[in-house]
Image (tube, coloured by chain):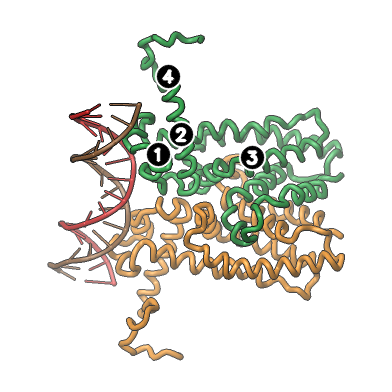
Chain colours: A orange, B green, C red, D brown
DNA sequence: GTCTATACTCTGATAGAC
DNA sequence: GTCTATCAGAGTATAGAC
């Protein structure tokens, strides 16, 4: 209730006008859901508005009534994603028990890759292309968080509370191992066959791996 | 010198006619090199013939003098790549010392991701998109190799020569960890800054990780 | 708010001169 | 073998009726 809703000045300034009605919010959400499906599998250029419109059950011009263009839809998806992306890193508690904290971070990342595989692939697509649209985020937001986390991990190493490991590579390894099950799910499914989900057994394996690695 | 070069029957049969002259081979190679650069960063749809032509220093129609079309260039790149992709797996020796064999497989994969990062990203792009063009290869060639390797690893586990681990996840973990340094190089570079190469320290870390994991 | 029709740009591919 | 010119189709975006 901080901003007056009846104001006619919604277009002033450089910020995007906020959607107002309930139906607008709902349709934007439907479009974003469809766009996530399409962008995450085909990449930005590979995706077409036709595909997104069909997936959303709307007409192409109707999409462009809710968003300024293809780029706008994509940017909105990425923005939402990056918020979520930093969250697990922030949950690491410097006061907690080191191995428990790292293990829970790993589990949260694995769960994200299981519950939100499309978001993971959307992110992977961006990085593969050289991170043109999220370079700023990585350099300014992610990097700082990673540096802080690495410092914390190094302190734990120095205190002898976990085995000596390079903290950056430890973080990268968690990203690589957890995201792999989402990003390369197609390959895993083809190799393991129809009987398995890509993530089957992953948690047990990763727990085993990291408890072996981190035991002082 | 096994095939007569003067034959006029080069177009017979369903196989692609083999390029003959030295300059043809050379130009095809130049085009493939340029195409690898472009396809690996932008994906199949994101890449344009214009980009590839510029990168190769040739005109667009000249590209299409050497290849039948965009798909043809891409297919040729993938075919070459997949050959290389299976090689390290085949080098695993069932008669060798288990931990040495696995460690060397990991090192070979890491070296491939360092020496051929574009090939790794080309492959990653295909898998991210659901492996539409290499489904057959994965199902028919890669899967069999992986099953055989997993059997071998399981025997080593049963004999107590390596610690008990799920052999499929062990293989996946090596893929994930080694390819990550090529596929996510842009992210790693932005986080670690200009002073580091993405692969710096990776080998030491992975050796440490796998010797801890596999010690019986 | 939603649709049909359409404008305009980009891109893969071809024709044909040299 | 290589180039300029150009076509045909796909794809983003807009106009305007309803």
* Of callouts 2 and 1, the N-terminal one: 2
Please determine if labels 4 and 2 lie on a single subunit. yes
Is residue B128 left or right of A204 when viewed as pictured?
Answer: left
Q: Residue at x 60, y 35 (%)?
A: B85
What is the CA distance from the residue labelled 2 to the residue labelled 3? 21 Å
Q: Where is residue B75 drawn, in percent x and y?
A: 45, 34
Q: CA distance from mark 2 to mark 1?
A: 9 Å
Q: Quadrant of the C terminus of chain B?
A: top right
Mark 2 on the same chain as mark 3 = yes
Could you tell whether A15 is left or right of A120 in the image? left
Mark seen at residue B57: 1
Q: Give the percent coordinates (x, y) of residue A145.
A: 65, 69
For disc 4, the marked residue is B20
Q: Tell me the chain of label 3.
A: B
Q: Are marks 2 and 1 in contact (CB under 8 Å)?
A: yes
Q: Secondary structure at mark 2?
A: helix
- Of B158 and A94, nearer the camera is A94
* Circle 4: element type: loop
Determine which quarter of the picture holds residue A48. Answer: bottom left
User: Pointer 2 indicates a residue of which chain?
Assistant: B
Q: Nearer the viewer, residue B22 or B135?
A: B22
Mark 3 lies on residue: B112
Element at badge 3? helix
Observer able to see residue B40:
yes
Tell me, yes or no, whether dots 2 and 1 are on the same chain.
yes
Badge 4: chain ID:
B
């Amino acid at each position: 209730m901080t901003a007056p809703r009846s104001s006619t000045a919604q277009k002033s300034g450089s910020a995007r006008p906020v959607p107002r009605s309930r139906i607008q919010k709902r349709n934007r959400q439907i479009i974003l859901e469809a766009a996530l499906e399409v962008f995450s599998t085909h990449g930005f250029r590979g995706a077409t508005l036709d595909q997104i419109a069909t997936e959303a059950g709307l007409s192409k011009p109707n999409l462009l009534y809710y968003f300024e263009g293809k780029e706008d839809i994509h940017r909105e998806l990425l923005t939402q994603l990056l918020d979520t992306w930093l969250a697990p890193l922030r949950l690491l508690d410097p006061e907690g028990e080191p191995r428990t904290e790292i293990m829970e971070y790993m589990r949260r990342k694995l769960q994200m890759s299981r519950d939100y595989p499309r978001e993971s692939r959307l992110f992977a697509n961006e990085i593969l292309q050289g991170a043109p649209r999220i370079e700023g985020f990585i350099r300014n937001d992610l990097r700082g968080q990673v540096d802080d986390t690495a410092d914390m991990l190094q302190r734990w190493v120095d205190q002898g509370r976990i085995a000596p490991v390079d903290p950056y590579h430890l973080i990268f390894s968690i990203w690589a191992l957890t995201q792999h099950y989402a990003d390369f799910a197609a390959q895993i499914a083809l190799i393991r066959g129809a009987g398995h989900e890509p993530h089957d057994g992953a948690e047990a394996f990763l727990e085993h791996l990291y408890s072996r690695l981190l035991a002082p």
